[in-house]
Image (cartoon, grey):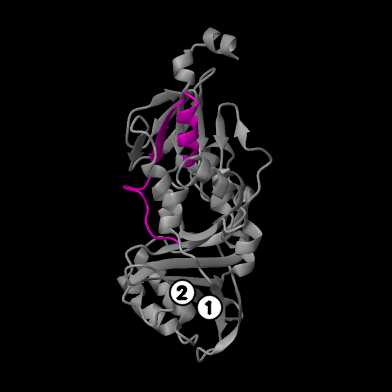
Amino acid sequence: MQRSLRNSRGSVAQARKVLISGAGVAGPALAWWLHRFGFEPTIVEIAPQLRTGGYMIDFWGKGFDLIERMGLLRKVEERGYQIKEVRFVHENGSRAGGFSTEGFRKATGGRFTSIPRSDLADIIWRALPEAIETRFGDEVERLEADGDAVRVHFANSAAETFGLVVGADGLHSRVRKLLFRPEGKFETFLGYAFAAYTVTGYGPRTTDTYMGYAVPGRSVSRVSMRDDRTLILLIWRDESPNLPSTDEGRRALLKDRFAGMGWEADRMLQVVDEATDLYLDSISQIHLPRWSDGRVALVGDAAWAPSFLAGEGCGLGII
């Protein structure tokens, strides 16, 4: 391989330059490992800064093991939550069912925690060596194969050549669209959508318990967090994956879908206007015939999204 690289138009040094699109979980994790093995990764992220908010994930298994190998387990456990119970309630708030999480702890030998997705991403990103550059507020606009390299044209900066380009840019991956168009051919919409947001001062609070209420086609839930914050999660049946693109439109949609549902739904809708981290998306899976083409590859949800409901997207992204 070294011989073919030396004989190509690109140098070995250029071949070690890797562009990663996406500063979520998979992208920074990949950058960390690439740097460890002598590569020179650069991360480009369309958002103006690292994203906050999002939903709570259950974190365990091989992704958990890799975080430990990266020396980040203590920080993950410090920012994680040890949820002790999942409780389902009736409309009046009385207990309808649920279960203890003790079984999960026994099955994993205690190697299990719940953590906001954005907190996990933040921990990995902050662990990156200073030599790894993150370019916020930019994205890949066009890709050109150039022998043993890829010429990348950006939306807001000058074109540059890399030895490898990796799309780690999530369910609606820009790199995947450039590589295998159109997106609709590979996305399987599962007929649901979800919204997540955090608010301060919401009551009542139920420590270490995931509270949920559901009727056919809709569910609302909440979990109390540190600093008097509460994470709220709404899931609903939807006919189309095409959702509003503005916060105003998203809030209007949620109020239309959940008004009068019962339990705390109306209270959750009253505080959605206070949320600064409203996250809303369709629930879909990605199925691709392959995850690379030449020197462009996909990882994480961009390549194999199992869907939000699967609960292991972040672990798979790290792996």
Q: Is residue 46 magenta?
A: yes
Q: Nearer the viewer, residue 37 or 75?
A: 75
**Circle on res. 184:** none
Q: Nearer the viewer, residue 85 or 200?
A: 85
Among numbered discs 1 and 2, the one appearing first in the sequence? 1
Q: Are marks 1 and 2 in contact (CB under 8 Å)?
A: yes
Please state the horizontal and vertical placement of residue 40, each as a whole percent of the image: 43, 26
Please state the horizontal and vertical placement of residue 255, each as a whole percent of the image: 42, 78
Q: Nearer the viewer, residue 3 or 114?
A: 114
Q: Is residue 163 above or below residue 274?
A: above
**Circle on res. 212:** 1
The count of marks equals: 2
Please state the horizontal and vertical placement of residue 204, each as a whole percent of the image: 39, 83
Question: Please, what is the three-letter code of the amino acid marked with disc 2?
Answer: Arg
> For mark 2, what is the residue?
222
Q: Give the SS element for disc 1.
A: strand
Q: Is residue 32 magenta?
A: yes
Which image quarter is the C terminus in? top right
**Occupied quadrant, residue 103:** bottom right
Residue at the right extreme of this rendering: 289
